[in-house]
Image (spheres, helix red, strand yellow):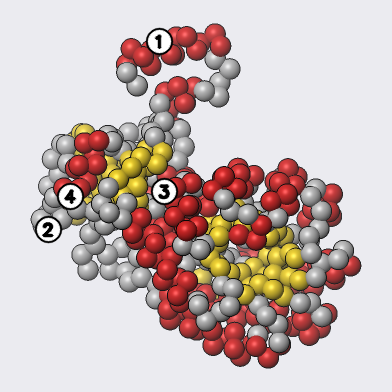
Amino acid sequence: MQKLPFCSAEKLREIASVYPTPFHLYDEKGIRETARRVQAAFSWNHGFREHFAVKANPNPYILSILKSEGCGVDCASITELMLAKAVGFEGEDIMFSSNMTPAEDYIYARKLGATINLDDITHIEFLKRNGGIPEKICLRYNPGGELHIGNTCMGHPWDAKYGMTRPQIFQAIRILQNEGVKQFGLHTLLASNSTDSAYYPTIARMLFKLAAEAHEMIGADFFMINLSGGVGIPYRPQQSPANIEEIADDVRRLYEQMIEPTGMKIHIASELGRYMTGPHGCLVATAIHEKHIYKEYIGLDACAANLMRPAMYGAYHHITIAGKENQPNDHIYDIVGSLCENNDKFAIDRPLPHIDIGDLVVIHDTGAHGHSMGYNYNGKLRSAEVLLQEDGSFSLIRRAETPLDYFATIDCTPYFAAIQKETEALEL
Ligand SMILES: *Cc1c(COP(=O)(O)O)cnc(C)c1O
């Protein structure tokens, strides 16, 4: 299947003439449509809530779009909580699914009234001392062993640092009941980027069973089952998107079988990140160099510091060349950035049309875990973020970093004048 960007070549050129490349571009229309689709799919469940995983795209403008669609957020650090508050999320809009949590993070999460997702049994005492135990709390489960879906092994939860064992969940519930907790949530996250439509139903079955057993055996009352994130997107042209309606319907059937007989009124929550915004972003860069040695290279003005996934996980990101979408892919290129690291390659041996210097290179599916994983290695600066609005207009929702941003955290009193002078001279 042909995989095209959400934005036409003309529009990309127009945007690039206003905001120089590289930049991440986001599609408001696509984000809204996905949010509506997820909520419609789970509308059978009273109180269903998608808590967007902030780490996937921590831009307040993106968060406020999701807020206006009725989503909450999932945060994991004090700064993500501050961001959520600034956008107007409050109380149970916010899931706080952290691990190895610093004391000040718990204190602040409690102050905001966020739903605490306890990663470990030892955090009960820690939370008691730092923020206090709330009346409703969520527990993160780690089933151990291997996660199988059909004949496929999806992962090794025993190897993951997150969550509590089954005996610990029961023990934690007893302790927390004595601490005055009235209602519990259950959470687990066992996969990343799973396009298998059985992933959510598999963990729903696991959590529904645990909740029903804890209800029957120790009288625990549950208010929420949180299926968390991990639903994948089709990064490759031959992949098809996860069918969220079918997934939600399978979860409904399990809910009817396993939860309804218990009489508990449980709402389903999700903490999708990638699924919500991943396909609705792209990294737009310019081809600035070509190099012919043992292989053919195209050098971009973007690098792994703007999009880490290919370098870090060998992840595939589809690439198209603006205006050459329908030309034959009759050249083989490595598409690379400028870091002094040989893994700084957006694509290796990728069939693409002939690329000219100055072409706009569109790296797809960067709307989640893209800009947010950025870093400053080699003194590279984080790029701008631009929002393509529903009416076709566009606006800058984060400016690109400047050298002064890069130097701002150093006590550079003795150097500051020199850096500032240089920045001004270079008009950066
Ligand atoms: C990363 C993360 C998510 C989102 O994961 P996606 O793969 O982007 O859906 C949700 N919940 C928690 C606790 C996470 O750490």
| Foreground residue among 163 and 393 | 393
Q: Position of residue 49 (x, y in %)?
A: 56, 68
Is tag 2's residue or tag 3's residue first in the polypeptide sequence?
Answer: 2
- The quarter of the displayed image where residue 21 is located: top left
Name the element at disc 4.
helix
Can you identify the residue that label 3 sits on? 370
Can you identify the residue that label 2 sits on? 326
> Mark 4 and mark 3: span between their CA atoms?
21 Å
> Mark 2 and mark 1: span between their CA atoms?
47 Å
Dot label at residue 421? 1
The amino acid pointed to by label 2 is Asn
Picture residue at 68% right of the left edge, 60% below the top:
115
Name the element at disc 1.
helix
Q: Are marks 1 and 3 in contact (CB under 8 Å)?
A: no
Q: Are marks 2 and 1 in contact (CB under 8 Å)?
A: no
The amino acid pointed to by label 1 is Lys
Can you identify the residue that label 4 sits on? 9
Determine whether 146 is above or below 78 in the image. below
Q: Residues within 10 Å of mark 1 (few under 14, many from 20)?
A: few
Question: Can residue 258 be spotted in the picture?
Answer: yes
| Foreground residue among 376 and 136 | 136
Closest to the camera, between mark 4 and mark 2, is: 4
